[in-house]
Amino acid sequence: MTAQNEIGSLSTPSLLLDRAQLARNAARMRAQAAGLGVSIRPHLKTTKSLDAAPFVLGSPPGPATVSTLKEAEMFGGAGITDLLYAVCISPQKLSRVTALRRRGIDLKIILDSVEAAETVAAHAKQSGDALSVLIEIDVDDHRSGVRWDNRDTLVRIGQTLTKGGAILQGVMCHSGESYNLHDADALAAAADLERVRILEAADSLRAAGLPCPVVSVGATPTALNARSYEGVTEVRAGVYMFFDLVQAGIGVCGVGDIALSVLATVIGHQRDKNWIITDAGWMALSADRGTAGQAVDQYYGLVCDADGQPYPDLVVLRANQEHGILAARPGSGANIPDIKVGDRIRILPNHACATAAQHDQYHVIEPDNSVSAIWPRFRGW
């Protein structure tokens, strides 16, 4: 859908997406993966947009990653058919997975327990659908997955799947603890640890005579700092498409690399408190405070002028449902800029995925601040 206006004519709050920066970010990840001789399976949960997806895909069918079956339905229906559903499967969703696969969507699922493998195997036998499965591996004690060194459980899961008629595709992991790092060497070390540990898990399966053709790793911080992916077949990442303040705090990108922002309007002042009030609260920004534990706390977002240039140390200090309170970053000693009622500002997000999820469309902007397109987003599970 096209649009012919400037951002000054948009109602606020509105979600802005810098088309050129999106393309640059996507090109950076493609170059990184190509340089390490590994394929990339972009995580489309970040965009949830059929219009944005082509910017990051290597080819129309994929490969790609999704985090909901709604995403699989939408992207699969648009011809992006090589999909990995990267959340451990629940039994109630298996019939929906099979329905998608019967529509020609090569949807792969993941799991991390013998119990889930037994359920998947029973469904494969009952439905006649030889489900494609990857085992999730815990490589850094971050979230879910079988520990990389738990050989007995890995083999039991693999045997349960293959004997039950499902197809064991391999192993996958998410090195989420990398989000707590902020040094390039530390991130590179985390990427290497991720690689070594998932390969140990893959070797355990192979030593037991089980197939493991796919070794899939993923997280934007490690993907952009890895120095070797020997033995790895694919990398998954998503937030690199837009980047955000968390990634900038980790050191993965600069603030100028962030492609996403929320356009807001100044609606008032509390001058005795040195506050500026806007019409963008947590309903527009999300309540994500992912930078709170970083060296620089960006509170609910970093404030920029209408052209996207950050004001020094001006942040969204507090966020109510429909009100954002702008103030100098505590302890910075920064001066409050002279922003008048009716002026437009842009707010950079802590977490691009969470902020985008608050909106139903992107206003795609060009370098001259013209709005060249409106790209719908979808929601749901």
Image: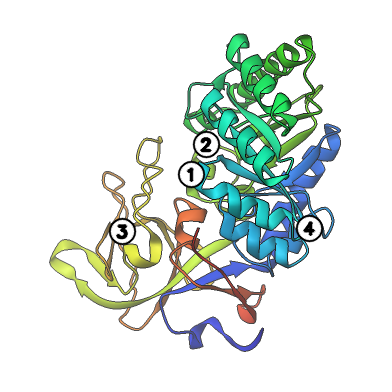
Q: Is residue 242 left or right of residue 334?
A: right
What separation in Å lies between label 1 and label 3 (alpha carbons)?
A: 24 Å
How many residues crowd mark 1 within 10 Å: few (<14), some (14–19), many (20+)?
Answer: many
Residue 252 seen by the camera: yes
Q: Which residue is mark 3?
A: 335
- Disc ID at residue 250: 2
- Near-viewer residue (334 or 343): 343
Q: Quadrant of residue 133?
A: top right
Q: Earlier in the sequence, mark 2 or mark 3?
A: 2
Q: Which residue is mark 4?
A: 104
Q: Earlier in the sequence, mark 4 or mark 1?
A: 4
Farthest front residue? 126
Circles 2 and 1, Cβ within 8 Å, touching? The answer is yes
Q: Which residue is mark 1?
A: 246
- Frontmost of labels 4 and 3 is 4
Q: What sort of colour scheme is used for the picture?
A: rainbow
- Frontmost of labels 1 and 3 is 1
Which residue lies at the image location 43% right of the left edge and 72% below the top edge?
A: 345
Q: Position of residue 266 (x, y in %)?
A: 33, 76
Q: Position of residue 255 (x, y in %)?
A: 54, 51
Say which element carries label 2. Answer: helix
Q: Earlier in the sequence, mark 1 or mark 3?
A: 1
Q: Position of residue 128 (x, y in %)?
A: 73, 44
Amino acid bearing label 2:
Ile
Say which element carries label 1. Answer: helix
Amino acid bearing label 3:
Asn
Amino acid bearing label 4:
Gly
How many residues crowd mark 2 within 10 Å: few (<14), some (14–19), many (20+)?
Answer: many
